[in-house]
Image (cartoon, rainbow, N blue to C red):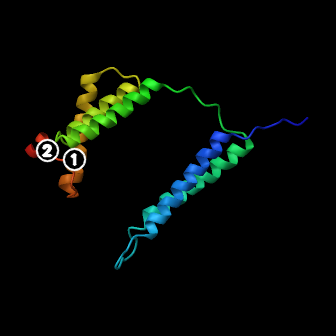
């Protein structure tokens, strides 16, 4: 008795997209112009990420050809729209000068709501705390530039 396995077309498309993303990472990495690097340099992580993406593409492609990918769940359009709305709010708040901390807190509320949580004030406070921690870590400790708003000017 032979069981007929069906090739998963969507799985193959995902494998090809992962492979294309891996190629883009390697191509971009090869465009880096470095004067001199001692030890592990800035090309190390793109190599790790590109190799990881290529391995994921290979594995996903093999499983898709064998027909072993699990059945997909239905799409929750409300959750997707909430997350996209949160990303839009993040971009708008940063562009309008709201700053990194408020934008991050707003995104956190949108994503937690998309996952079914309805504690908006608590989620905003958690997002605010995480955004403040990230801002302090990156802007103050690592001296990286993050979008500044009214709250960041107080710190």
Q: Residues within 10 Å of mark 2 (few under 14, many from 20)?
A: some
Image-based side of 80 in relation to 35, left or right: right
Residue 104 occupies which quadrant of the picture?
top left
Residue 42 occupies which quadrant of the picture?
bottom left
Q: Residue at x 61, y 49 (%)?
A: 15
Across and down, in percent, residue 140 comes to 17, 54
Question: Which part of the image, by quadrant, shows the N terminus?
Answer: top right
Q: Residue furthest left?
A: 154
Across and down, in percent, residue 25 comes to 47, 60
Across and down, in percent, residue 34 comes to 36, 75
Q: Residues within 10 Å of mark 1 (few under 14, many from 20)?
A: many
Q: Which residue is mark 2?
A: 152
Residue 97 occupies which quadrant of the picture?
top left
Q: Is residue 84 visible?
A: yes
Across and down, in percent, residue 46 comes to 45, 62
Q: Which residue is mark 1?
A: 135
Tell me the SS state at disc 1.
helix
- Mark toward the start of the polypeptide (2 vs 1): 1
Q: Is residue 132 visible?
A: no
Image-based side of 133 in relation to 73, left or right: left
Image-based side of 79 in relation to 96, left or right: right
Mark 2–mark 1 CB contact (< 8 Å): yes
Q: Residue at x 28, y 34 (%)?
A: 89
């Amino acid at each position: 008795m032979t069981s007929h396995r069906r090739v998963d077309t969507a799985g193959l498309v995902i494998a090809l997209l992962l492979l294309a993303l891996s190629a883009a990472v390697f191509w971009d990495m090869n465009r880096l112009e470095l004067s001199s690097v001692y030890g592990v340099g800035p090309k190390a992580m793109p190599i790790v990420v590109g190799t990881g993406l290529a391995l994921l593409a290979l594995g996903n492609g093999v499983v898709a050809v064998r027909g072993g990918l699990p059945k997909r769940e239905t799409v929750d359009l409300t959750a997707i729209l909430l997350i996209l709305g949160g990303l839009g709010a993040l971009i708008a708040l940063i562009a309008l000068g709201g700053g990194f901390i408020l934008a991050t807190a707003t995104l956190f509320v949108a994503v937690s709501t998309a996952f079914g949580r309805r504690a908006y004030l608590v989620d905003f406070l958690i997002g605010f705390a995480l955004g403040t921690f990230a801002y302090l870590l990156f802007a103050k400790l690592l001296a990286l530039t993050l979008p500044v708003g009214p709250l960041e000017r107080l710190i």
